[in-house]
Image (spheres, helix red, strand yellow):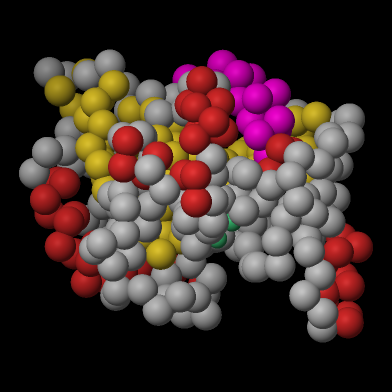
Amino acid sequence: MPTRKRVQGFKGSRVQGLVQRPRRVLFLGDVCSEAGRKAVRHALPQLQEKTEPDFIIVNVENAAGGYGITPRLAEEILKSGVDCMTTGDHAFDRKEAWDCFVSQPKLLRPLNFPDPVPGKGQAVFEKNGFCIGVINLMGRAFMKPLDCPFQRVSQVVEQLRRKTPVVIVDFHAEATAEKQAMGWYLDGRVSAVLGTHTHVQTADERISPQGTAYISDVGMCGAFDSILGMSKDDSLRRILEMVPVRLHPATRDLRINAVLLEIDESSGRALSIERLNSVAEEEPTEPDEAGSTAGR
Ligand SMILES: [Fe+2]
Ligand SMILES: [Fe+2]
């Protein structure tokens, strides 16, 4: 059974005496390995039935054995009803996916990679009359020294808002302070700033007075009997013995961490943000691919 907690903000705009039905955006945290993909396959249909989202965004940076994404897996995830896939520091772990960042319009990489890097960090989508902008960004604290995410997002946010007031930002970052800073930096300029990367869902969701939904981290879709989705034994050995042990994906206790946003379409203001945590599958999953020695 999914557990849910909802935070409400602004009440919504009135058009000809009627309250418009808010648009609903479902955002799933980092999908980690075959366990995460299986969790999505099993739990997403139920979640869709319960929440009736207009648009679904999923972070897929760990979908391939915990490290990156492949063209085949991108197709598989899209077939489950996903509308946009975001990534992060593992975006380019799989060389075979590099072309996919150019050819697949629904796959984003962090905007603040240097310009020659393939792919794009923002896009506007239209689905059933709903126009939504998505920006994928990466933090720099304790991460790769990419271009400044604050400067880069400032350059594109107004560009996107000329097309639609509804803009969602996936801020893939390690440090909570940097995530909170981005939340306040974009306050009132976007509909939501949603943190990803740490794989642990935080309980700090809120709607700012300016109408921006925020959570420090949405969490993970994957095996929760693990350390951040990877084998406990491998991870412990790496930490205790300080050796570069290869991490393998964990396989048990499959869950989905997500948030559901309700957004006033005419203003772009977030009306509510709700944390979702669904148990997807109790049976063990076979590990798909070997991991690597890199971080999450
Ligand atoms: Fe991740
Ligand atoms: Fe990450």
Quadrant in which residue 185 is drawn: bottom left
Q: Is residue 6 visible?
A: no
Q: Quadrant of the C terminus?
A: bottom right
* Residue at image location 53% in from the left, 71% down from the top: 174
Residue farthest along the front direction in this orientation: 96
Q: Is residue 117 visible?
A: yes
Can you say whether 23 is above or below 158 in the image? above
Q: Quadrant of ligand 2?
A: bottom right
Between 25 and 109, the one lying in front of the other is 109
143 lies left or right of 104: right
User: Residue 38, image x and y in percent?
Assistant: 71, 30
57 part of magenta stretch: no
* Residue at image location 91% in from the left, 63% down from the top: 233
Q: Quadrant of the N terminus?
A: top right
The tally of labels here is: 0
Can you say whether 163 is above or below 76 in the image? below
User: Residue 80, image x and y in percent?
Assistant: 54, 22
Between 117 and 241, the one lying in front of the other is 117
Q: Which residues are magenta?
A: 36-52
160 lies left or right of 141: left
Between 112 and 97, the one lying in front of the other is 97
* Residue at image location 16% in from the left, 38% down from the top: 164
257 lies left or right of 272: right
User: Residue 205, image x and y in percent?
Assistant: 50, 55
User: Residue 21, image x and y in percent?
Assistant: 31, 22
